[in-house]
Amino acid sequence: MDPIRNATKARLEAGEVAIGVGLRQARTVDIGKAMKTCGYDWLFIDMEHGSMSVDVAAQMSVAAQDAGITPIVRVPGFQHFHATRVLDAGAQGIVVPHVDTPQVAAQMVSNCRYPPVGHRSVTGALPQVDFRSHALGEMTAALNDTTLLVLMIETPEALENVEAIAATDGVDVLLVGSNDLCMEMGIPGQLDHPDVVTALERVIAACKTHGKHAGLGGVYTPALMERYIRMGMRFVLAGSDLSFMMNAASERASFVRNLDL
């Protein structure tokens, strides 16, 4: 079978920064091609905080594959069907929020990986292989290898368990949800707080020890993003559709409103 291409995983394995954009308002399949043109590597299709359906997420995922940008879906919970339905429909990665223990990490590996790694159920031909039929063992092994499993570290409990979570076979990325982490630590919005820096250092170190990739979400001030990327963050959520639209629209409205006529 032809190789399955996951551009984001390839970037991470090469030691490069993979840049993502969060999608909550976008609902049309052209968003993948647009964000690819803007220079992004992956889509963060948000089904935890967004209201889009599985059907919409699936259509966006299939179109993103053809555009050469990786569709990654944040699921709303730990039940297996949240992840497997979007994987079967075209997603090339899953983000799981609020992973606090290695037991939950292992369960998500079981949900998202085919045997012998996990226990994901097999269905018919998939978008990731252009709906072609292949030898089952070959296809499932290729999908296991090219599907990204991203676990979010968002609480002090998760930080305490970060070594064990990072050591879980089948996990690719530990993504720090910086805003939720700050809330849980009692320092809301203080993304440059020394305790946050220590937390990020701890996640980065655990990832390096266990061959995983460290991810950063919720930090969008350029100087602070640069600082944390230089520390070792590689899977970087760089902004969202709503924030980009609001910032650009506000800037243009302000310009026109303040013309000296």
Image: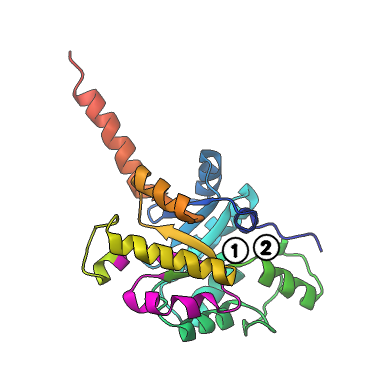
Image-quadrant location for residue 9: bottom right
Q: Which mark is residue 92?
A: 1
> Residue drawn 42% across and 68% down?
202
Residue 251 sits above or below residue 111 on the image: above
Q: Amino acid at mark 2?
A: Gln
For residue 72, say whether it is visible.
Answer: yes
Q: Earlier in the sequence, mark 1 or mark 2?
A: 1
**Label 1 SS:** loop
Tell me, yes or no, whether the highlighted magenta stretch contains residue 237: no
Quadrant location of the N terminus in the rendered image: bottom right
Which residue is at a point 48% across and 83% down the rendered structure image?
102
Percent position of residue 49, x then y: 35, 65
**Pointers 1 and 2 in contact (C-beta within 8 Å):** yes
Q: Relative to 143, does residue 137 appear above or below in the rendering? A: below
Q: Please state which of residues 228 and 139 is positioned toward the viewer in this rendering.
A: 228
Quarter in which the C terminus is drawn: top left
Find numbered disc 2 in the image and state the secondary structure of the residue it sits on.
helix
Q: Quadrant of residue 119?
A: bottom right
* Residue 201 drawn above or below residue 19: below
Give the percent coordinates (x, y) of residue 247.
Answer: 31, 40
Q: Amino acid at mark 1?
A: Gln
**Which residue is at 60% across, 57% downward?**
12
Neighbour tally class for label 1: few under 14, some 14-19, many 20 plus, Cα within 10 Å: many
Q: At 60% across and 76% down in the image, what residue appears?
A: 170
Viewer-side residue, 261 vs 164: 164
User: Magenta includes 162?
Assistant: yes
Q: Which residues are magenta?
A: 153-181
Position of residue 244 in the picture relative to residue 133 (left or right)? left
Tell me where residue 132 appears, x and y as whole percent. 77, 65
Residue on which the image places disc 2: 128
Q: Position of residue 167 (x, y in %)?
A: 55, 78
Circle 2 Cα neighbour tier, 10 Å, few/some/many (<14 / 14–19 / ≥20): many
